Image (tube, grey):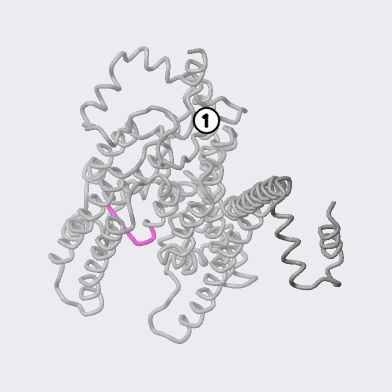
Amino acid sequence: MCPYITHQVDNIRNPNETTDETNEVAMDLLKGDPRNKNREQADAQTEIKDLKLTNWLKEKALDEEKDKQKMPSINSLIAMTSMSMCFLMGSSALVRLFLILYGQWQDTHMEVRYTDIDYIVFSDAASLMASNSSPFGRTTYRYSPLLAFLLIPNSFLHPLWGKFIFSVADLLVGYLLYSILKMRAVPERLCLYSVVAWLFNPFTFTIGTRGNCEPIVCAMILWIIMCLMNGNLKQAAFWYGLVVHFRIYPIIYSLSIVLTLDAHNFRANQKPLLHSWSYDNKPNISEKSPTRETISLWNAYRNLVTDRCVRIRQMITKERIIFGLFSCTVFCFWTGLFYYLYGWEFLNEALLYHLTRTDPRHNFSIYFYDIYLRHEHGFSLVERLLSFLPQLMVQPFLVFSFAGDLPFCLFLQTVAFVAFNKVITAQYFVWFFCLLPLILPWTTMKLRWTGLLCICLWVAAQIHWLMWGYLLEFKGMNVFIELWLASIFFLAANTWVMVVIMKHHKFLPLFVDSKSTAEKKID
């Protein structure tokens, strides 16, 4: 090698001893070497590959982080769920506690009492029972003696005992609603939104804190649904017999529950398969929704009587017989026990009175004005029973059309029963409000604008009626005709809202038909 080149390379190896001129010469010589060019190209390609790999790893890490944020782990999801539900339950409990204490203050400082007159009746009946007397010695007490028994501590513990019992039952309704929705795999956020419709509904939390017993009835009805979903047939039958004795109106649910206990989807002592909520809000099976096709009352009855003998044989199953016998036994036991203790007075006040009840005072019912005009002359038994004719026509139609979707069917039955009842008070609205959260996840109705329209129309019809009721009761004005027209408008509003809900509901049977599922697997 040339001594000059050797000297220049040595200078490169010792950069501290080189000058700028020698460095430039050495770099020019090295660049001219083809092996260095190939090495540089290889190094450049390697760097490019390393850079691409690094970028890909970074992008993958970012995608995984986004996925973790979108889909949290099971443990974190459980923690979020419990925290959210605990917050709702705790805050709603504080609201009810505040209203109970505020009601006590209003009762002592204001002319208009916060406490419902029914609570005073309950407390007086409980005091009579505590002194070994009949609770029916208190006039206008027309409930099961079990209610008076629950409120006995009112007379020796504290007068607010009953309100706390009713409010606890109110909170229990919220928890049962949440549990039922989770059993059907409803997403957490949708679950909580649905439960809020009960826990923070002004109608619901004022009813319990004012001292009305309806939250207890609502809790028992939801527990019956939950027992059926878990396959606990006898337990459901026990509570159904008890709730019908406690409050007679749930008798309207008997046919829909019995029809739900089909041999293909329900077996005693076996947990049935449930249809779960799906993200597309559509049924998991190819099934036509009865709300999407024209259903006439004639078609419903014609389908019922077709092949009558075959249908009767199919309807008589072991599960239906067990439910019917067990629930009837429980109902007869409590009814017979209290008939033995209190005699005919119990039967007349707690049961028969509600079948022939005529209330001349103004209420939301369209029948009140006719009852008011004819109250002094009295009504025959036939006239009293004829008022049930609209309900007897509507209820079977709803049952035979929607019994498969049990919560939705019970909701429609309750709304129709209240709307066409002879007597309607504000506490009756709680009967269907406790079932409303169970159908919200399956509705296609948007809050804007159809949902708001339904809410505003229903509330406006009620406020319109209350305005005329205030003028009649507190101002003494003769507005009976206007109040009756307001009752007709309220009935029309209830009917329209119910039809809109039916139109936007995604019909989905509660239980999976095991027979059709097995046939699909075979195919």
| Residue 475 in which image quadrant | bottom left
Q: Is 218 placed above or below 289 here?
A: below
Residue at 75%, 72% in the rendered image? 20
Q: Amino acid at mark 1?
A: Phe
Q: Percent position (x, y) of residue 362?
A: 25, 64
Is 430 on the left or on the right of 235, as rendered?
left
Name the one closer to the observer, 185 or 261: 185
Residue at 22%, 50% in the rendered image? 379
Q: Percent position (x, y) of residue 264?
A: 49, 21
**Which residue matches tag 1?**
323
Q: Is residue 356 visible?
A: yes
Name the one closer to the observer, 357 or 380: 357
Does dot 1 land on a helix, a strand or a loop?
Answer: helix
Q: How packed is label 1: few (under 14 Cα within 10 Å), some, or many (20 or more)?
A: many
Residue at 28%, 34% in the rendered image? 397
| Residue 458 in which image quadrant | bottom left
Q: Is 383 placed above or below 93 here?
A: above
Q: Is residue 73 visible?
A: no
Magenta region, residue range: 422-428
Most extreme residue toward the bottom, as rendered? Answer: 109
